[in-house]
């Protein structure tokens, strides 16, 4: 049991320490808002696309392109999103906060936390297709989560209604992560390979994602105090950290998923709220108090909850 717990801590504690380093550097004045903004741009536009491209462009697509696995993750995300939206629309008294509550409750940190966590867990795995399979699922779910959130704000918030459909299409097409996936699949299907100098550039570029991302996340964490909406913050955080992963694993078990597939499903649903989800709330007229508070709580607590889930999966024999 202690061995499983130590292995689980080794997976998640680096994220806490790097985020804590970001908080310390911000507190000491060694980095500021400009560093965080620029760092996030480097990660989003170069680091994550490079990671995904490098892992997928020469992967065995016969094994990586698991239609059943991808379909389950996509359908599950859409169903969970609609269920939370319906429940919030019916039960929340403050209708102006529905979009931010839902956005915070189901948007996982697929672009910042998921890739480095999957790499940390599966980079040395005996099956070389496990990591590319997980990263491909991350890429597909990024498109789905971004699109569903755009629809959510288009319906709930007037600021984003004017060009909802066109805006969604343009944003998805311009997303650098989507471009990275498309290029990787094209290289793979056409049998193209990168020259050595390009490989030696792309690979280290992808390696900066985890440390830089978590330093920026730690430096970006803010808490704006308590107000009447704090109950929405707590409920949204509980939904994100507990209800979403537990329900996903339960449904996945019913559909026969086991082993690494089940572990990846758990991880993708147990992630903290996405930093980009908060940015989207601010840009599209959402409730920034709910967004920033849920982001802080889930980023802080997910290290413990992810450790717990990974520990339980190791004990149960699902993580192989």
Image (spheres, helix red, strand yellow):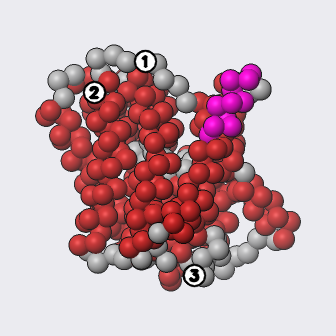
Which type of secondary structure does the marked residue at label 3 adopt? loop
CA–CA distance between discs 2 and 1? Answer: 12 Å
Say the numbered circle drawn on residue 209.
none
In the picture of the structure, the residue carrying the numbered disc 1 is 225
Predominant secondary structure, magenta span: helix
Image quadrant where residue 159 sits? top left
Position of 146 compared to 85: left or right?
A: right
Say the numbered circle drawn on residue 127.
3
Instruction: Answer with mark 2 or mark 1, whichever residue precedes in sequence.
Output: 1
Reply yes or no: does residue 20 show up in magenta: yes
Instruction: Answer with mark 3 or mark 2, whichever residue precedes in sequence.
Output: 3
CA–CA distance between discs 3 and 1? Answer: 46 Å
- Report the magenta residues as a range: 19-29
In the picture of the structure, the residue carrying the numbered disc 2 is 231
Residue 165 seen = no
At horizontal 35% and vertical 39% (from top left) the residue drawn is 237
Which type of secondary structure does the marked residue at label 1 adopt? loop
Residue 13 seen = yes
Position of 260 compared to 39: left or right?
A: left
């Amino acid at each position: 049991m202690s061995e499983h717990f130590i292995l689980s801590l080794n997976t998640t504690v680096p994220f806490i320490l790097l985020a804590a380093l970001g908080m310390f550097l911000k507190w000491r004045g060694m980095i500021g808002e400009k560093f965080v903004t620029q760092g996030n741009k480097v990660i989003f536009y170069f680091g994550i696309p490079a990671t995904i491209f490098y892992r997928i462009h020469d992967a065995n697509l016969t094994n990586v392109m698991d239609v059943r696995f991808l379909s389950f993750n996509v359908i599950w995300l859409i169903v969970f999103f609609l269920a939370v939206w319906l429940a919030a629309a019916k039960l929340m008294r403050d209708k102006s906060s529905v979009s931010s509550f839902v956005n915070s409750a189901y948007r996982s940190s697929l672009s910042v936390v998921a890739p480095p966590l999957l790499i940390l867990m599966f980079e040395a795995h005996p099956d070389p297709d496990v990591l590319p399979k997980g990263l491909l699922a991350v890429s597909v779910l990024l498109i789905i989560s971004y699109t569903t959130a755009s629809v959510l704000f288009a319906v709930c918030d007037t600021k984003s209604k004017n060009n909802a459909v066109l805006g969604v299409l343009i944003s998805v097409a311009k997303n650098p992560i989507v471009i990275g996936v498309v290029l990787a699949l094209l290289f793979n299907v056409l049998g193209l390979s990168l020259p050595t100098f390009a490989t030696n550039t792309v690979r280290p570029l992808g390696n900066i994602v985890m440390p830089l991302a978590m330093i920026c996340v730690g430096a970006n964490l803010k808490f704006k105090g308590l107000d009447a909406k704090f109950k929405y913050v707590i409920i949204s955080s509980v939904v994100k950290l507990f209800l979403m992963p537990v329900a996903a694993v339960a449904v996945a078990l019913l559909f026969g998923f086991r082993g690494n597939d089940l572990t990846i499903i758990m991880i993708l649903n147990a992630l903290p709220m996405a930093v980009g989800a908060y940015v989207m709330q601010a840009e599209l007229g959402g409730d920034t108090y709910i967004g920033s508070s849920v982001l802080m709580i889930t980023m802080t607590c997910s290290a413990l909850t992810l450790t717990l889930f990974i520990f339980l999966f190791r004990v149960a024999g699902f993580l192989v």
